[in-house]
Amino acid sequence: MFIGFPSTHSVEMAAYAGFDTVVLDNEHGMLSDEQIEHMTIAAELAGITPLVRVVSGDPTEILKALDRGAHGVHVPQVDSWEMAERVVEAVKYPPMGKRGAAFSMRAARYGTIPIHEYLENANRETLIAIHIENTTALERLDEILSVPQLDLIYIGPTDLSVSLGHGGRIDHPEVLEAADAIRDTARRHGVKIGIHTKNAIGAKQHLQWGADFVCLTITSLLNDAMSSFVKNARRD
């Protein structure tokens, strides 16, 4: 579940409700570095995986999220081999990447983990998810997905629909066709598929369609729950 406002309580509630992952949203959200760290701590204590959607593929943004304890990153609007490669380099330590090494930060338990053990675990376990959200990325799918070490390709149907000229109509045939093409290309490259959804029905449909990972925003969930409550409470 994507959470874009500062709330450790929401992170805990997502965990206790049975969600597997929270994605702390710093692209469209309002989270400071300190708030991300606090929400990451809450996630780990509650038993849910904390990821961060960074603003961009800037290595500095990625480093901040990972050093504060995120178990992986979602990177929006990746539309070239170079961008995807840069993301991988920012996440992985040498020799797999170029991430700057420091062992006094939270991700390394403030230096209490043996350095070789921390580096191996970080390179093996840290998730890399890139978002495919525009027509340029569609044209370069094979090129982008040829980058080694990508774990998940995430489809943003709304951004994709806007880029294709269909302004939020995520059920438009061209948008659905594009999603199918992304899924099929990712399968050929051995990369997992994620997709954004709006409710439980959509999540189930996307899993049947072939998604490995589905996610929604906490605002969608709250809006649906609140409007449903009011509607049903006022019904004669």
Image (tube, rainbow, N blue to C red):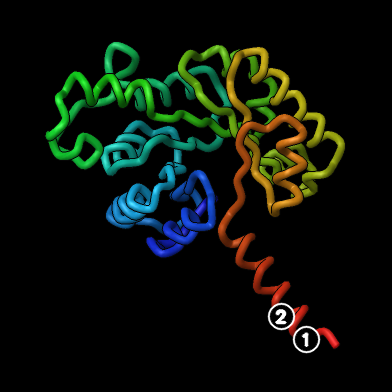
Look at the numbered disc 2 and give the secondary structure of its residue. helix
- Left or right side of 84 for 112: left
Q: Is residue 123 above or below residue 42?
A: above
Where, by quadrant of the figure, is residue 99 drawn?
top left
Q: Position of residue 225 (x, y in %)?
A: 66, 69
Residue 36 visible at all: no
Q: Residue at position x 64%, y 60% from top?
A: 220
- Mark carried by residue 157: none
Where, by quadrant of the figure, is residue 115 drawn?
top left
- Left or right side of 33 for 140: right
Q: Position of residue 10 (x, y in %)?
A: 46, 62
Q: Which residue is mark 2?
A: 230
Q: Which of 227 and 133 lies nearest the eye of the viewer?
A: 227
Q: Position of residue 139 (x, y in %)?
A: 69, 21
Q: Residue at position x 47%, y 61% from top?
A: 13
Q: Amino acid at mark 2?
A: Val
Q: Residue at position x 64%, y 35% from top?
A: 155
The C terminus sits in image quarter:
bottom right
Q: Residues within 10 Å of mark 1 (few under 14, many from 20)?
A: few
Q: Which residue is mark 1?
A: 234
Q: Is residue 154 above or below residue 86?
A: below
- Proximity of marks 1 and 2: CB atoms separated by less than 8 Å: yes
Q: Is residue 210 above or below residue 116?
A: below
Q: Amino acid at mark 1?
A: Arg
